[in-house]
């Protein structure tokens, strides 16, 4: 059964920035949980050139209802001119976990 959950992905230039963004999302109840990866290597095209950077990946657990607010908060606080902000729907998950994410991000809490 499809859920209302989204897994959002966002990269940050360093651990401190990633921790600040993650804390903001959880504090504002835009995300129930944000996992931070070890540094990753990103290879990408930017302004006509191939670039390579070390970044930290944020795995953001939120809901479809909170996506727009989460995106807006990330854009407002993110240091990148064009931050990676993408979302993947969560088709299935442990019912108790899905319910927890929904409760943590419920705007009426």
Image (spheres, rainbow, N blue to C red):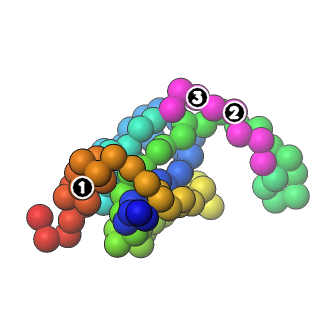
Q: Residue at x 39, y 50 (%)?
A: 93
Judge whether residue 9 is colored magenta: no
The image shows residue 11 at horizontal and vertical percentages of 56, 46
The image shows residue 98 at horizontal and vertical percentages of 30, 53
| Element on which disc 2 rests | strand
| Element on which disc 1 rests | helix
89 lies left or right of 19: right
96 lies left or right of 109: right
Q: Residue furthest left?
A: 109
Q: Residue at x 13, y 71 (%)?
A: 108
Is residue 76 shown to the viewer in this render? no
Task: Please tell me how crowded label 1 is: few (under 14), some (14-19), or many (20+) other residues with Cα within 10 Å.
Answer: some
The image shows residue 50 at horizontal and vertical percentages of 86, 47
Residue 39 tag number: 3
* Label 1 vs 3, first from the N-terminus: 3
Q: Residue at x 77, y 41 (%)?
A: 43
Judge whether residue 39 is colored magenta: yes
| Residue 80, quarter of the rendered image | bottom right
Marks 2 & 3, CB-CB < 8 Å contact: yes
Q: Which residue is mark 1?
A: 99
* Quarter in which the N terminus is drawn: bottom left
The image shows residue 103 at horizontal and vertical percentages of 19, 58
Q: Which callout, 1 or 3, points to the residue nearer the camera? A: 1
Separation (CA) of disc 1 from disc 3: 30 Å
Q: Which residue is mark 2?
A: 41
Q: Residue at x 81, y 53 (%)?
A: 45
- The magenta stretch is 37-44
| Element on which disc 3 rests | loop
| Residue 17, quarter of the rendered image | top left
């Amino acid at each position: 059964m499809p859920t209302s959950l989204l897994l959002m992905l966002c990269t940050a230039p360093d651990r401190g920035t990633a921790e600040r963004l993650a804390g903001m999302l959880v504090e504002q109840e835009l995300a129930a949980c944000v996992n931070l990866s070890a540094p990753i290597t990103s290879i990408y095209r930017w302004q006509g050139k191939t670039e390579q950077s070390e970044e930290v990946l944020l795995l953001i657990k939120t809901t479809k209802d909170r996506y727009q607010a989460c995106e807006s908060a990330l854009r407002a606080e993110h240091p990148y001119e064009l931050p990676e902000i993408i979302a993947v729907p969560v088709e299935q998950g442990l019912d108790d976990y899905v319910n927890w994410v929904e409760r943590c991000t419920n705007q009426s809490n």
